[in-house]
Image (cartoon, rainbow, N blue to C red):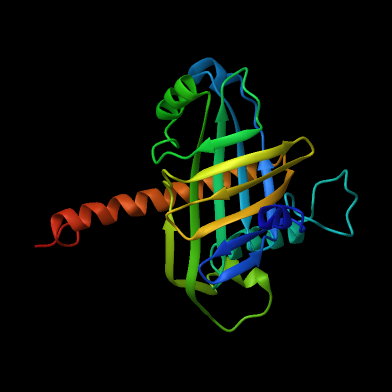
Amino acid sequence: MWILALVGCGMGSFTTADGAEPVRTALYFVPDSTVSLELYGARQAYVLLANSTLPCWPVDEDDDPDTPPTDNARSYWDAQFATVFAREGGRTVAFALSIDADADWLGRYSLHEDAWEAAAMGGYVATDGRVASGAWYEVIESAVDDGVGVSYALDGGIEVVEEAHDIAVGAPAWVEIARKDTALEGTFDFDPAPLSGGFTAERCDNLELLSDLYTYLAVLAIADGALEETDEAGGLPGTD
C-alpha cells in the first residue's frame, strides 16, 4: 500500500534511512534506438529523479514557446542543473532500462553493476530480455559563499564538502515499471543502500539534458577510478 501511495502522490517520493521526502524532478528519456538495436539488440529508456527542481527545458514566461529561450532563461536552467548536484541535502537517482526488441516495458528489472557498459547490457538483454543500470548521488554537506539566487551556483558559489554516491548499483536492487505512455510510473529499491521509492516521470525529449547527466556520471566514474589507483598505490599518484 505504501508503494501505491508514493506513486500516487505528485512525482513520487524517496524513502531513505532518514524517512520519506518528495521527488521534485521526475523525467524520462527515450532516445532513438536504431543504433542500440542494431549493435546490442536493445531498446533503452533513461530516468532522472531528484529532490531538487529541474524542468525538462529552460522556462521563460515572457517568451513565445515557439522561439528559443532567452539567455537569462538558459542561464537559470544551467544553474538549476548545477544546484541539483551541489546543494546540501540534494539527492539524485538515475537509471537506464534496457529491453529486447519484442519485450514489454512493464515489469521488473534487475540491476547489475556492469550494466552501464553497452556490451554487458546487451548480454543481459540477450539472456534475460531486460536489465537496468542505476546510480545515486547525495550531497551530505556543502558550503555556500555570500550570494543571491540559484544562478550563484554557476559561479562556484556552492562547494560540495562531503558527498556519497554509487554509480554502479548492483543486485539485489531492482526497478519495476507499472505504466509507460505519456508518463513512466514505477517503484525501485536500491538495496543494500537504504534508498527506495516510487515515481511518476514525465517524458522529456531534451537529449542535451540526458547528455549532461551522462557527462556528470562519467566525471564521477573517472574520480572513482583515480581513487582506486590511489588506494592501490598507497598514496597520491606521483608521490613516494
**Quick one: quadrant of the N terminus?**
bottom right
Residue 149, percent across and down? 69, 75
- Quadrant of res 46: top right
Percent across and percent down for residue 12 are 70, 56
Q: Position of residue 211 (x, y in %)?
A: 57, 42
- State the count of labels: 0
Q: As drawn, is 20 to the left or to the right of 216? A: right
Residue 162 shown left or right of residue 80 in the figure: left
Q: Quadrant of residue 54?
A: bottom right
Residue 58: image quadrant is bottom right
Q: Residue at x 58, y 62 (%)?
A: 15
Task: Identify which residue is drawn at 80% across, 47% down.
Answer: 68
Q: Is residue 15 visible?
A: yes
Give the answer, above or below, for where 43 lies relative to 186.
Answer: above
Q: Is residue 74 visible?
A: no
Farthest top residue in view: 38
Looking at the rendering, in which quadrant would you find the C terminus?
bottom left
Q: Residue at x 54, y 36 (%)?
A: 109
Q: Extreme left residue here?
A: 240
Q: Is residue 75 above or below residue 157?
A: above
Question: Is 109 displayed left or right of 2 in the figure?
Answer: left
Question: Which residue sits furthest front?
Answer: 1
> Where residue 60 sits: x, y (%)?
83, 58
Most foreground residue, 4 or 56: 4
